[in-house]
Amino acid sequence: FLPASRQSTRSLLVVMKLTKFVLSASVAAYVVGVPQIYAQEEYGDDLGDEYGGDEYDPYGGYGDMDDYGGYGGYGMGGGGGGAPGPEAHIQGVLDLDDKTFDKVITGDKHAFVEFYAPWCGHCKEFKSTYEEIAESMGDLPNLILAKVNAEENPALSERFDIQGFPTMKVFPKGQDPMDYEGDRSADAVIDYLSGIAGGAGTVEALNGPVEAFMNKPSAGAVKQLATAVAGLEGDEAEAGKYYEKVANNVVSKGTEYLDKEIGRLSRMLDSGSVKSEKVAEFKARTNVLKVFAKAKEEL
């Protein structure tokens, strides 16, 4: 057989190359596929970690599907299949037990404690929320964020009358614990805890001087606030400088300055236009402004 022209020759070469490619691919598929087919026949659905059998859990081998949150991960709070559970460590949140609880929650600081069960779907959902809360408030010196595995610590569960999961307990400084019954969104919890312990950038020791200032804003009241700031040390002294700035602006611009500035900073943060290195600073400023605004509302 001889091609009639150069064009025919080129076409023949193309066909030959395609045929060679198809044959090579078929052989490769056979070589790869046979061992897997054999393994499937030999071991059934539990084909092995690489292939993930019907109940394969990448975080703990093969387990009961109820580990995913009731009824195989469907309904009853659900829960992400294979996602780290509420027992996984969260940066900024302490894991407490029967032996460590009273050593940490001593009443000299505010505390927010989640009591959870590892199988609880709602607890698994709250994990990501708690991560947001910790990111915002985990470095506050006067606030402890913690969690307790209620199933592994029945004495604590009985002591604090834990009836369901998750249960959030608030331990205000020097006061008896109480249930947190508000919304479980990160923003709602952060707002609640800010009202108790202040937010990042706030100084608890200045709450009284701020209330006194807002009772009758004046140049003389600014000096009194400045005196309180002068008695601070370290990071608190640095944060106190913004308190003085806010007080001066309230005197010169009126108390309406507070809501306007809170709104301005909030819009900038929500827009995403603030540089990453400035986000924490803007949030701290907003928190300080809210301390003054709260004092104004309580007059």
Image (cartoon, rainbow, N blue to C red):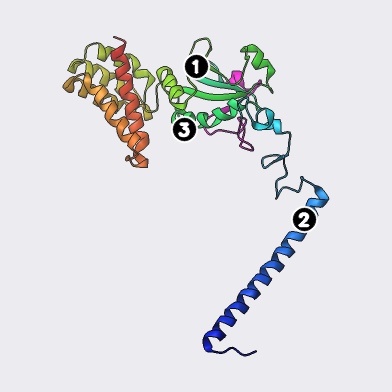
* Residue 238 visible to the viewer: no
In this picture, residue 45 sits left or right of residue 252:
right
- The quadrant of the image that shows the N terminus is bottom right
What is the magenta segment's predominant secondary structure? loop
User: Which numbered disc flags the more N-terminal residue, 3 or 1?
Assistant: 1
Q: CA distance from mark 2 to mark 1?
A: 64 Å
Name the residue tied to disc 2.
37
* Rendered image quadrant of residue 202: top left
Q: Crowdedness of circle 1 by 10 Å Cα count: few (<14), some, many (20+)?
A: some
Q: Amino acid at mark 1?
A: Asp
**Residue in the picture at 39% in, 28% down:** 200
Name the residue tied to disc 3.
135
Percent position (x, y) of residue 35?
A: 77, 59
| Boundaries of the magenta span | 79-104
Residue at the limit of the structure toward the right, as seen here: 42
Find numbered disc 2 in the image and state the secondary structure of the residue it sits on: helix
